[in-house]
Amino acid sequence: MDQDQEVRIDKWLWAARFYRTRSIAKNMIETGRVQYNGQRVKTSRVVEVGAVITVKQGYDEKTVVVRGLCQDRRCFSQASQLYEETAESMEKRQRNAEARRLNALFSPHPEDKPDKKQRRELLKLKNSFGEQS
């Protein structure tokens, strides 16, 4: 982890293991799901130590502070040393996960998948409601 090198944000996100490939990281930056110091950025933006990066992944949003720079992808233990997640971000992710878990308790889930006959009956029922309107 060399601190005096210049690293593009797409390479840094890939090296820090936020995204599996650089092309996915590039796509996320271009669609605005990554913010650098609270602003949208381009993929060529140079990352600086101490910068705040917000990364949206699925339902979660992580806010991290850059602690190190690296251009190559390494093992997870080394990659996790490149950043530090803020306490507010961790607390918010835990609250959201708990809310999703509690919400799942109220949505009905069948014990098993319907078989072929039951699927046909469901389709007939759905189609009959569509014809009435």
Image: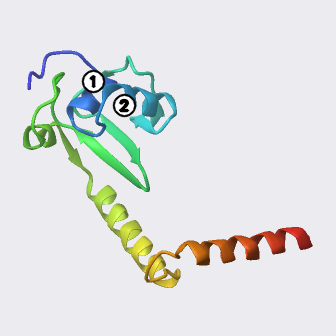
46 or 50: nearer the viewer: 46
Left or right, residue 91 beside residue 79: right
Residue displayed at 43% across by 83% down? 111
Residue 12: x, y in percent?
A: 25, 28
The quarter of the displayed image where residue 20 is located:
top left
At 39% across and 48% down in the image, what residue appears? 57
Kindly identify the residue that appears in the image at 21 percent across and 30 percent down: 15
Query: Which is nearer the N-term, disc 1 or disc 2?
Result: 1
> Is residue 99 left or right of 88 when viewed as pictured?
right
Pointers 1 and 2 in contact (C-beta within 8 Å): yes
Disc 2, SS: helix
Estimate how packed mark 2 is, as few (under 14), some (14 to 19) or many (20 or more) residues with alpha carbons within 10 Å.
many
Residue depicted at x 30% and y 30%: 21
Q: Which mark is residue 11?
A: 1
Q: Is residue 104 visible?
A: yes
Q: Amino acid at mark 1?
A: Lys
The residue singled out by tag 2 in the image is 25
| Nearer-the-camera pick, 129 or 50 | 129
Looking at numbered disc 2 in the image, what kind of residue is underneath it?
Answer: Ala
Residue 47 showing in the rendered view: no
Quadrant location, the N terminus? top left
Report how far apart the C-alphas of labels 1 and 2 lie in the structure.
8 Å
In the structure shown, which secondary structural element does the residue marked by tag 1 occupy?
A: helix
* Nearer to me, 22 or 114: 114
Q: Does 19 sit left or right of 81 as displayed?
A: right
Drawn side of residue 21 relative to residue 113, left or right: left
Q: Position of residue 26 (x, y in %)?
A: 40, 26
Which quadrant of the structure image shows residue 133? Answer: bottom right
